[in-house]
Amino acid sequence: MNVPRYDELADVDGSIRAHWKPIVERYARLGDAGLRRADQRLRNLIDDDGITHITPADDSTTPRRWELDCVPLLVDSEYWSTVERGVQQRARVLDALLADVYGEQRMIEAGVLPPELVYGHPGYLRRAVRHARTHAHTLVMYAGDVGRTPTGELVVYADRVQAPSGIGYAVADRKLMARALPNLVQACMPRPLTAFVAALRLALVDYAPPGVEDPMVAVLAPGAQSESTFDQSYLAAALGFPIVEAVDLVVRDGAVYMRSLGKLKRLDVILRRVDADYADPLDLRADSRLGVTGLVEAVARGAVTVVNTLGSGVLENPALAGYLPALSRALLDEDLVLESAPTLWGGAAHELDGLLSGLPTMTTTNFRTAEQFAGPGLTTAQLTTLRERITATPWQWVGQVRPDFSVAPSATPARPGRAGASLRAAPVSFRVFGIAQGTGYAVMPGGLGSVLADNTVGDMNSVAAKDIWVIADSSSASADDAIGRRVSGTGSLSAGQDIAFVSDTVFASSPRVLSDLFWFGRYGERAESTTRMVRVARERYEDFRYRPWMTGAASIPLFLTAVIAATGPAGATRPAPAPDDANEAVVILHTLTVDRTTSGSVAYAVDHLSRAARAIRDQLSTSTPMVLGTIGRALDQLVTSSATDPEAVDLGRTHDDVLRGLLALSGLQAESMVRDPGWQYMDIGRRVERAQMLATFTATVLAEQHDPDVDVGLMEAYLTANESAIIYRRRNRGVFRLAAVLAVLLFDDANPRSMIYQLATLRTNLTTLPDAVRSAAGERVVEEVITALRRIDPVDLASVDDAGRRNDLVVLLETVGAGMRELTDILARTRFAYPTHTQPLWGTGSKVRS
């Protein structure tokens, strides 16, 4: 007999639970149409903020939009008090167990804990044994995945202590809901999450090695291709700490240092988002590219604190769940408040038969290899093979009975990709977080919820995230006040001391960060220049496509060919369209706009711009994702309309929308970023790209002489694409002469679009960099190019040979292009070069985890 799932919204009589009534009334007034509008507002905000994730099961590393249910999960204070007490207790049990496992190992000696569950788990690190304990807790951060059974009982189906993720997403979700549904948030008044983030920041500072008065804290992340890149960068920004990767760090004399502007800054605390066995290629996994060589030794010496500590992953062994009640009584003399989901471990003789017979209904895991099998989805043959494997090594296998999670109102689709935004009952679970505070743990008054797919295979595929609203009462308000007092100074901070003192406010300017900023600048300029060129080509083509007999029409195929050549080798192979070949021209313009596989297209540059932005999110204006989101949506809309309604394709609107976004991005860079070395390298990248694009474009448009009418058409389009047509007309009264055109776009110091302006700005940026990151060789290259430009008169560049080719102009532009390429190579070798990875004497080991 199937027991119905627990209903979070209504009781057994069908009556709406009290804490849900305000929200039910408001959603009823919204109706389906209002719900769809709210859902669309939420989706737009997610795009604006650039909130993405990468699904671990996907082969692709392309980020997907974060999906968030526009209906929150409401939790009353009584329910939450049980969650809070249970999470605090589980954190204390696991903290005590972690200290024992790497210390006296009393639980193993007393027979409370089977040794196979410790020594046989890959999360157990022998190098972490008997590290000196210098703080109140060994386990600083805890997260638990919680659900409610059909009887209403709360169970924990996973303890997350290796490198708990999701805090950044939870905080972002709350901000999104507050912006999308402000009246609803004000009516329900869920408990805020800001105090928890501040408590986490303070805890990290508190856990610095003894004697450190002004600790330097950083977040160690695996990189921009990680499935939780946004979560890491958002949390780092909220905490006010720099986010670093392994290449940014080095161990010297037993301490960890961060590379910054050619110097080394000592790190005292590392918030680790890399699995422990990847954290040090010297002492742990030799094939790791995510860790810091010598980190284990630095931790052993007490020179740096790693949160969570190396070796904490052993606590994520799912087979431990069955022993937690006994461990809680042995370590704390307390019964568990929150039970674990039922598990069966093959290493226990009395549980093996149950495990083997229950395979069709359980999720079975090999904790040695991390293989996982959802029983309902296995065939008879697969189940037979699995039984044979379990029988061969029973101690490695554990089965967990997944609960039939409670259901709550949701506006998400039952399956990814289906229509949503109409209310339905969907299974839900959530992750709750705890952080060490004093002698106990503070719990986030909310969490990261999940709407689960309606299927029979494990019931654990998430359709969307869900914000958790804990409805406040007087007791919860006092709990929030307690966290607030701890953060504001009545705890470990002395009177008058501001939490902002905790770290150097100058973020890391490591070679990796400088390189990413440089290429962020380059791809931003490449996207803008390409958009301008394609936009002008489209406008002029549309002007003349139905009037090929008019003066200037003959310049259109030549200009379009020049645009193709200037935007990269992939496009240069396409032939020029005939003047009356409308279809070919439209295809080329469309390709150069939205084809992500064409290296010279606008979409290609925007994709790489967004990728660079994800790697340095903590270095950019907080409005940058919003701007990039509008650009991405403009391109996506063109792709969609091209596939569904070709007659509605509007290239002009797309070009305008993309250019508007790129201009906004330039404004953010100019007005909302500190002029530090990182900004200077970003601007260097921008100037290098503009100079190189201008040199290439000028050569493709003006290197050869044509009939006067054609040359005039080309010069006019060239000036327009380089945002200099108005100033040219004002100075030259509309008379087009090549020498005058070149004077404006190559030699005019006052024109921010001119070549000499780019080179002069490059020289200023390079010479004003701090000595540690200056490049004398780069300065010399720029000076040589400026000298070559200054020596030439525009009139001389306009001269042609017998074949009608302007060789002096071509030579000059090749000099500029070669100089920009040489400058890029110099910076890559001397300022952006990553350190060589340490290789073990016995080889590279197994496949590198990306």
Image (cartoon, rainbow, N blue to C red):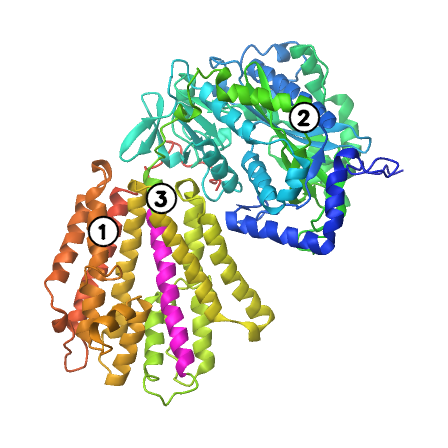
Is residue 798 placed above or below 421 in the rendered structure?
below
Q: Amino acid at mark 2?
A: Ala
Q: Mark 1 falls on what kind of element?
A: helix
Of the 4 image quadrants, the one containing the N terminus is top right
Q: Amino acid at mark 3?
A: Met
SS assignment at label 3: loop
x%, y% of residue 115?
Answer: 62, 18
In space, the residues marked 1 and 3 are separated at their CA atoms by 18 Å
Q: Amino acid at mark 1?
A: Leu
Q: Name the outermost residue toward the left.
A: 791
Specify whether residue 381 is in view.
Answer: no
Residue 459: percent from the left, percent from the top?
73, 41
The residue at 18%/53% (across/down) is 782
Q: Pick whichever of labels 1 and 2 is earlier in the sequence.
A: 2
Front tag of 1 and 2: 1
Residue 96 in sight in this render: yes
Say whether residue 559 is magenta: no
- Which of 98 and 448 lies nearest the eye of the viewer? 448
Question: Label 2: how many residues lie within 10 Å, few (<14), some (14-19) or many (20+)?
Answer: many
On the image, numbered disc 3 is attached to which residue?
Answer: 673
Query: Which residue is the site of mark 2?
Result: 319
Q: Which residues are magenta?
A: 518-544
Circle 2 SS class:
helix
Mark 3 and 2 residues: CB-CB less than 8 Å, in contact?
Answer: no
Side (left or right) of 491 relative to 714 = right
Task: Decide whether the magenta segment is chiefly helix, strand or loop.
Answer: helix
Residue at which label 1 appears? 762
